[in-house]
Amino acid sequence: MLADALIILVKVVLTLTWTLLLALFLTWVERKESAVMQDRIGANRASVFGLRLFGLFQPFADAIKMLFKEDFAPTFAQRALHWLAPALSFFFVGVTMIAVPFGDPIRLFGRTIPLQVVDLNAAVLFVLAMLSLGIYGILVGGWASSNRFALIGSLRGAAQLVSYEVALGLSLVGLVMVFPSLSLARIVEFQGGLLFGVLPKWGVFLQPLGFAVFFIAGMAGTKRVPFDMPEGESEIIGFYTEYGGLKFGLFMFTDFLEVIVLSALATTMFFGGWQVPWLGDAGFVFPWGGRAAMAPWAVTVLRVLSFNLKVLFFCWLQILTRWTYPRFRYDQVMDLGWKVLVPLGVVNVLATGLILAAR
Amino acid sequence: MIKAWRVLTEIGRGAWITARHFFVNMTFHTLRLVGVKTKRRGAVTIQYPEVRKELSPRHRSLHRIRPRADGRPSCVACMLCVAVCPSECIIVEAAEDPDPEIQKRPAKFVVDLNRCCFCGLCVEACPVDAIRMDTGEIRLAATDRSGLEISLDKP
């Protein structure tokens, strides 16, 4: 009993550390990647004892700066809610990671430990619910600021997120039809098989349209640049206008957490999660006949590594998207959501159903 | 349908351009990191305080008074620069020079950089080519205004 509780605690701490550290360094990655894309160098001045490491200490410098800023709330704001909003925003995104499996179950001291904080049997619904609840952070933040621009920004954000929730949910219906489970661990296990004897049976090969809809709707959910209706940091005034210091930092951090969560979910549901192509429990079995036996620990390491690499790839892809495309207009956002993604999601569900029925 | 296809190809082209920049630049950064010298660099950035961009020879930077062979300023306090200065930022007080060939020397030669517009007219007006703007010093900043009133007659 105690051991079980301890294992859960360790897993929670590890997951949280992994997520937060990745989000912290994603701020650095974003600055560097955008710089390299634009033929610049990017943040490289933060140093500890003259050690620069390509500016890798920049996130810590930013964090320290934000920690020491004045904790300011405008006099006309509703203080308690003003305080609560960033925490809400942050919590609901951060808690999503507990449903994501990081690797296959490992065996230690006669126990089987799934590398996942909790194996929820309705994890897909839980994830969607938590991503939807994140809207409250925006709404409360805009409302509690008692600032008309912030309120309008938060309403824009709520409208956008609610619209894209529909497409996000629809895109996963097809996936759940193909892999008949709502548990993320089961979905990943289903993706271990082979398609036509060659391709790994990943969600993206079975549900290409579903993946496209999911990823675009998910990116709209992260509220980052092509879809940054709620904040519009460069021109329009957004929902965290009245925030500063660490509370503002928490809102910014939430965006990066959402990038990671979306990457982790896309990896888990459409790109095989921790599955390495053709890697079984005993080693590689290639479809062209070769095989390479591997120790169980090596298999586990490879699988965890594979999950991390896929997540990093999707983070990279999202940052690339963020620095490539200009912002949608408000009506374009709504058009894309309701007139393109939702119909495509419905088509995907219908096509999947027809194919499954005809099979 | 055709419009959707064109939109998609444009989206793809945009991502291709930025991704190409990313990978090409990363290749050159990595080559530099492992010590391979390449003609092209991964970034166009000049790391300013350590690396300085070479200024044009015609660049007008902080003023200086050309010294004579014995180190005294070569200015003869003719006041032409004061007269021509559109910003009225040059303050010169003349004094008698012990050398009768020179007759006058500046007792005070102050350029007020708060007002100077770096037009270079003083350089063109000087009959003895005493004032020049070729120091290459462009880091002109001070914590108060008096710090920008620069005396040029004392070395």
Image (cartoon, coloured by chain):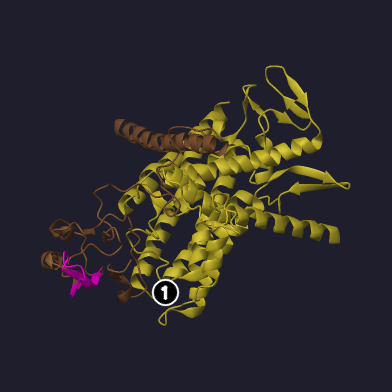
Chain colours: A yellow, B brown
| A123 part of magenta stretch | no
Name the quadrant of the N terminus of chain A: bottom right
Q: Residue pushed farthest top?
A: A289
Q: Quadrant of residue A103?
A: top right
Name the quadrant of the C terminus of chain A: top right
Q: Which residues are magenta?
A: B92-112
Instruction: Look at mark 1 in the image and give the residue it sits on.
Output: A145
Q: Is residue B119 left or right of residue B135?
A: left
Q: Main secondary structure of the magenta part?
A: strand
Amino acid on which the number 1 mark rests in the picture? Ser
Crowding at mark 1 (Cα within 10 Å: few <14, some 14-19, many 20+): many
> Residue A225 location, x and y as percent?
40, 51
Tally of marks: 1
Q: Does residue A17 appear in this view?
A: yes
Q: Residue at x 17, y 69 (%)?
A: B104
Q: Residue pushed farthest right?
A: A110
